[in-house]
Image (tube, helix red, strand yellow):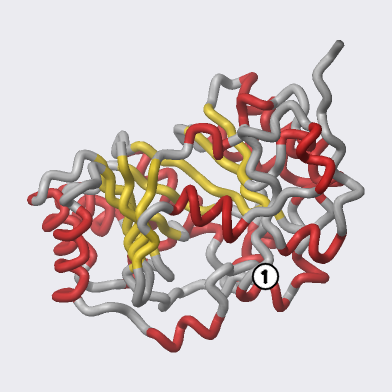
């Protein structure tokens, strides 16, 4: 299965402190309907899955039309990647589902309104939770992403418990990528990964206990000993990204070559051939002392 990630534009109704796109990209605005249909048709040539993302795709007035067009072209999975706020409106949920959307990737970054709203820069928690509840009531597949930050990492187990109570199909904890707004807010956003790891493991345990698929992203194997099966990169499908004005034909390759990094000690690790390492901005700031290679037992 090959996935097409289509950036519909960069306008958003949240203002996340950790946004990898950054506020500058909002100046690009959103692509128009005609151009997006050309991109969708191009993606349909070699992809079975399409993800509409942004920015925030649900604030587009033409999203239902774009989803219907993707369905017409035969995509098996049509995912909406969203902050979830628009799904608080049942009418919108019914319209987007009827058009063909059948998977919803929503973002929840705190177990309380205070924490989530602080990170998203908007009063969004209640709408996001309501959106998850509406979609689950309509028997839709909901997968969630939580960006791990300095403010929320101690609460990952509580976030996991909330997601279980909302009956999401799966949830992922993604270590913050220090680009865009996250790069500018580095000191108050990026935690030390070795401090995150125990809380991430407890959150993954919540998923295991309740038989939910729970994963982490951008945390190397050496940080997750005993939880290797929970590392998301091992099962990520091939993905083509249609960005603002260019196409990343092989995101896996680009992510490894351009995005992630390996330290000198990594070559001795038994997971070196499959581990991607952390986002390169992290060791550039903190060094490699936290990352200890896992050696094969003699």
Residue at x 50%, y 45% (from the top left corner): 144
Specify the quadrant of the image occupied by residue 209.
top right
Residue at x 54%, y 26% (from the top left corner): 212
Where is residue 73? Give x, y as percent. 10, 50
From the viewer's perspective, is 203 left or right of 294? left
Q: Tag 1's secondary structure?
A: helix
Where is residue 243? Give x, y as percent. 37, 69
Residue designated by label 1: 182
From the viewer's perspective, is 88 left or right of 290? left
Residue 21 versus residue 133 in the image, above or below: below
Where is residue 263? Give x, y as percent. 79, 49
Residue at x 37%, y 75% (from the top left corner): 244
Q: Mark 1: give few (<14), some (14-19) or many (20+) Cα within 10 Å.
A: many
Which quarter of the image is occupied by the N terminus? Answer: top left
Residue at x 15%, y 68% (from the top left corner): 38
Q: Which is more toward the observer, 144 or 237?
A: 237
Q: Which is more toward the observer, 270 or 26?
A: 270
From the viewer's perspective, is 4 left or right of 128? left
Residue 199 versus residue 282 in the image, above or below: above
Where is residue 242? Give x, y as percent. 33, 64
């Amino acid at each position: 299965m090959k996935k097409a990630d289509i950036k519909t534009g960069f306008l958003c109704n949240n203002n996340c402190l950790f946004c990898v796109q950054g506020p500058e990209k909002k100046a690009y605005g959103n692509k128009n309907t005609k151009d997006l249909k050309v991109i969708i048709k191009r993606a349909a040539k070699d992809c079975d899955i399409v993800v509409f993302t942004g920015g925030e795709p649900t604030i587009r007035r033409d999203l239902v039309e774009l989803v219907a067009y993707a369905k017409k072209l035969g995509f098996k999975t049509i995912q909406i990647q969203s902050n979830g706020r628009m799904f608080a409106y049942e009418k919108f949920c019914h319209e987007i589902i009827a058009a063909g959307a059948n998977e919803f990737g929503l973002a929840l970054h705190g177990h309380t309104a205070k924490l989530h709203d602080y990170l998203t820069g908007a009063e969004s928690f209640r709408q996001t939770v309501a959106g998850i509840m509406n979609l689950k009531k309509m028997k839709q597949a909901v997968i969630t992403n939580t960006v791990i930050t300095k403010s929320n990492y101690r609460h990952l187990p509580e976030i996991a418990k909330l997601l279980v109570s909302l009956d999401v199909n799966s949830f992922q904890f993604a270590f913050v990528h220090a680009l865009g707004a996250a790069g500018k807010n580095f000191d108050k956003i990026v935690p030390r990964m070795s401090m995150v790891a125990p809380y991430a493991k407890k959150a993954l345990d919540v998923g295991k206990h309740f038989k939910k698929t729970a994963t982490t992203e951008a945390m190397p194997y050496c940080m997750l000993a005993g939880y290797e099966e929970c590392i998301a990169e091992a099962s990520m499908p091939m993905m083509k990204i249609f960005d603002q004005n260019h196409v990343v034909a092989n995101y896996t390759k680009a992510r490894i070559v351009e995005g992630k990094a390996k330290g000198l000690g990594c070559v001795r690790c038994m997971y070196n051939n499959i581990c991607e390492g952390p986002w390169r901005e992290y060791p550039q700031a903190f060094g490699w002392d936290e990352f200890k290679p896992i050696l094969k037992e003699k």
